[in-house]
Image (spheres, rainbow, N blue to C red):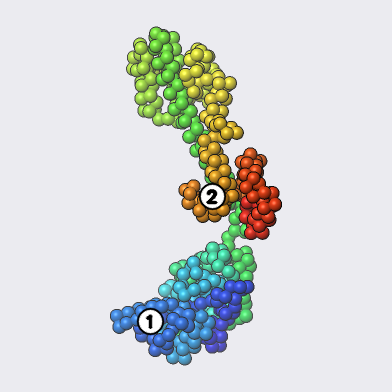
């Protein structure tokens, strides 16, 4: 079987296009072009090859990608001239660069066996190694078995798989190689951009020609190979992802809960400082000091604040009293006997500290339920003058009114975006919002319509609306 036939079987329909897409596949040739460049035409870049400059200083290997005809001509040349160390890509690419992001079709898996590196197998030929050890271990038959001149390749051709299958392709490739590692399968040679030696070319390390050992007509589908080689089923993967997602959500929920507890502790400390200041002004020197420090310590302990930080905050609060406790009293008498499962609720804290309604007016956290709801409402929704909107909502509403006025003046979305210092997409989004919420702008639109009727008359206005409808302008929605 000729090299061209093998490559054609691996790369079927390279010139095939889909729908209006005229892009065709590119195959890659890797070799020392500075030594074997006689066949490369001067106008090679016009035939689908990647541009690269050559001179006497260039040495080593470079890969060039070609469309089908030129790609297969190089395969023929490598076989006919028995060129040294010529490789071709098993997968094809959209453009002229061999890179994973440019893959168009996934065509095959090529497992490279370096069995000669293993002492047990180093004296065997490629044919003997395959028949005795590799063939019995494979759950499926390779499409091609090729003697690489030193080791061997087992190539498993697959039905055309698009680039969207790259991740599952790499997973299957990895597990095929791992399953054959005992026979010298090279884990490094499992890339989606993998290249292998051209049959009929020469392996310069051994001086042997690359030949085919066995060929079958087997061509597999990605789902079939996934069931055979991947350790988990699709359902198990989905279940694992769901568990992982749930676990992450739990962690986020715990983090949010922890952050909320820390925020509440900061609010509590602020209120306690304010309460001390109020009572200092009233000349209240005692009767609540130990309880205040205890309640803060209890909350701080539950929030998992470290002992050093708690002690620091306790001494800070203690120092604010007109008649502070001694350091020893503050750190011993006010310390909770143990870390209790539950902490004192806000309502009980208010009772224990005997916080009056007048004092609550100056506090934010240590307030009763009714006052707390009122504070929360004011914080979350600062009512404005226009229809109970926040300041940001008012600004958006005014901008949308400007958009309506600008459109009736014949201004384009680009001009309006420039005038209002926003991007064009914002103006388009505003138009869509106005169309679906016409009632919010009814008063302004009525004023504009009356102005247009007075200026042009009803007949002209109707013709304008028809014109706007024909050109699909949002104005016909506003004015009709």
Residue 74 is left or right of residue 105, and the answer is left
Q: Residue 299 appears at what percent x and percent y?
A: 47, 25
Residue 39 is left or right of residue 250, and the answer is left
Residue 408 is left or right of residue 324, and the answer is right
Q: Does any portion of residue 337 appear in the rendered image?
A: no
Disc 2 marks which residue? 426
Q: Name above or below for residue 456 compared with residue 98.
A: above
- The kind of secondary structure element at disc 1 is loop
Q: Residue 479 appears at what percent x and percent y?
A: 66, 48
Q: Residues within 10 Å of mark 1 (few under 14, many from 20)?
A: some
Instruction: Please tell me which residue is depicted at 44% across the width and 9% down the height of the picture.
Output: 287
Instruction: Please tell me which residue is depicted at 62% across the width and 47% down the height of the picture.
Output: 455
Disc 1 marks which residue? 32
Q: Does any portion of residue 53 appear in the rendered image?
A: yes
Instruction: Please tell me which residue is depicted at 65% across the width and 54% down the height of the picture.
Output: 464
Q: Residue 353 appears at what percent x and percent y?
A: 48, 14
Q: Residue 23 appears at what percent x and percent y?
A: 55, 75
Q: Nearer the viewer, residue 457 or 242?
A: 457
- The kind of secondary structure element at disc 2 is helix
Instruction: Please tell me which residue is depicted at 69% across the width and 49% down the height of the picture.
Output: 458
Q: Name above or below for residue 199 compared with residue 115.
A: below
Quadrant of the frame with the N terminus: bottom right
- Distance CA(mark 2)–CA(mark 1): 55 Å
Q: Nearer the viewer, residue 139 or 434?
A: 434
Residue at the far bottom: name it. 80
Q: Name above or below for residue 21 compared with residue 416.
A: below
Q: Residues within 10 Å of mark 2 (few under 14, many from 20)?
A: few
Rendered image: mark on residue 213: none
């Amino acid at each position: 079987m000729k090299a061209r036939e093998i490559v054609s079987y691996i790369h079927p329909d390279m010139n095939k296009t889909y729908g209006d897409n005229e892009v065709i596949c590119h195959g890659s040739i890797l070799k020392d072009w500075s030594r074997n460049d006689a066949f490369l035409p001067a106008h090679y870049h016009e035939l689908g090859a990647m541009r690269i400059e050559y001179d006497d200083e260039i040495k080593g290997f470079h890969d060039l990608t070609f469309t089908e005809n030129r790609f297969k001509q190089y395969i023929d040349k490598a076989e006919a001239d028995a060129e040294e160390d010529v490789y071709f890509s098993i997968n094809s690419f959209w453009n002229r660069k061999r890179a994973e992001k440019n893959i168009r079709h996934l065509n095959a898996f090529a497992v490279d066996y370096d069995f000669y590196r293993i002492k047990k197998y180093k004296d065997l030929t490629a044919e003997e190694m395959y028949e005795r050890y590799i063939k019995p271990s494979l759950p499926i038959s390779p499409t091609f078995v090729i003697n690489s001149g030193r080791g061997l390749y087992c190539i498993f051709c697959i039905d055309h798989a698009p680039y969207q299958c790259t991740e599952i392709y790499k997973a299957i490739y990895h597990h095929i190689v791992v399953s054959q590692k005992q026979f010298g399968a090279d884990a490094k040679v499992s890339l989606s951009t993998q290249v292998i030696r051209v049959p009929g070319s020469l392996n310069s390390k051994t001086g042997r020609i690359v030949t085919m050992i066995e060929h079958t007509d087997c061509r597999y589908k990605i789902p079939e190979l996934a069931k055979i080689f991947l350790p988990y089923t699709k359902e198990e993967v989905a279940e694992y992802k769901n568990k992982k997602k749930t676990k992450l959500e739990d962690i986020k929920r715990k983090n949010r809960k922890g952050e909320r507890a820390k925020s509440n502790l900061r609010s509590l400390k602020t209120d306690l400082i304010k309460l001390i200041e109020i009572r200092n002004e009233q000349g209240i020197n005692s009767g609540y000091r130990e309880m205040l420090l205890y309640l803060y310590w209890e909350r701080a302990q539950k929030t998992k604040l470290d002992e050093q930080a708690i002690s620091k905050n306790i001494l800070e609060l203690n120092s604010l009293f007109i008649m502070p406790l001694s350091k020893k009293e503050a750190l011993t008498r006010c310390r909770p006997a143990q870390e209790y499962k539950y902490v004192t609720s806000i309502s009980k804290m208010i009772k224990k500290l005997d916080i009056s309604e007048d004092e609550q007016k100056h506090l934010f956290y240590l307030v009763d339920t009714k006052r707390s709801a009122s504070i929360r409402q004011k914080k979350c929704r600062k009512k404005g003058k226009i229809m109970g909107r926040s300041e940001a909502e008012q600004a958006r509403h005014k901008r949308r009114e400007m958009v309506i006025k600008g459109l009736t003046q014949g201004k384009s979305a680009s001009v309006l975006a420039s005038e209002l210092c926003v991007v064009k997409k914002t103006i388009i989004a505003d138009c869509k919002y106005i169309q679906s919420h016409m009632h919010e702008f009814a008063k302004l639109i009525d004023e504009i319509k009356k102005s247009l009727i007075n200026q042009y008359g009803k007949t002209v206005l109707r013709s304008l609306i028809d014109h706007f409808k024909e050109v699909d302008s949002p104005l016909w929605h506003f004015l009709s």
